[in-house]
Amino acid sequence: LDRFGLGSEDLARAHPGLVVVELCAYSRLGPWATKRGFDSLVQCASGLAHEHSVALGRLDQPEHLPAQFLDYVTGYLAATGAMQCLGQRSSAT
């Protein structure tokens, strides 16, 4: 989005009251910063799929959680953080 002038810094300059939530799968600075991430890939990279298969007693291959759990939790936390920012801003005025 940065190359289109829609990065968080550009948006903050154009709209100072805007709350922007940015999500990164692995970190903005580490060696995987440019890698794309989605739930099943992150489940494998983090070891969660392996631990889930151990819990199920299936040690022959990793077993993903039955739902896109990490995507749901990430979205929930991002939305909660944005709402907290809006709530703090409205209570400060």
Image: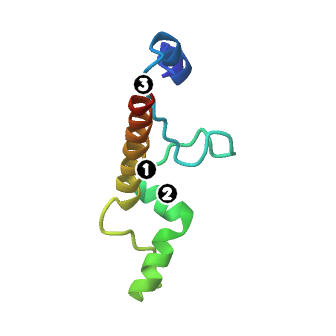
Indicate the quadrant where residue 15 lies.
Answer: top left
Judged from the image, the secondary structure of the residue bearing numbered disc 1 is: loop
Q: Label 1 sits on what residue type?
A: Phe
Q: Residues within 10 Å of mark 3 (few under 14, many from 20)?
A: few
Residue at the far bottom in the pictured view: 57
User: Which numbered disc covers residue 38?
Assistant: 1
- Residue 87: give x, y in percent of width and height: 39, 37
**Label 3 to label 2: alpha-carbon separation:** 40 Å
- Tell me which residue sits at (49%, 35%) in the image: 22
Residue at the far top in the pictured view: 14
**Label 3 to label 1: alpha-carbon separation:** 38 Å
- Tell me which residue sits at (39%, 85%) in the image: 56
Using the image as rendered, state which of residue 8 and residue 58 is in the foreground.
8
Q: Is residue 53 visible?
A: yes
Quadrant that contains the C terminus: top left
Tag 3–tag 1 contact (CB < 8 Å):
no
Tag 3–tag 2 contact (CB < 8 Å):
no
Q: Earlier in the sequence, mark 3 or mark 2?
A: 2
- Residue 32: give x, y in percent of width and height: 63, 46
> Relative to 17, is 45 above or below?
below
Q: Label 3 sits on what residue type?
A: Thr
User: Which numbered disc covers residue 12?
Assistant: none
Judged from the image, the secondary structure of the residue bearing numbered disc 2 is: helix
User: Which numbered disc covers residue 93?
Assistant: 3
Judged from the image, the secondary structure of the residue bearing numbered disc 3 is: loop
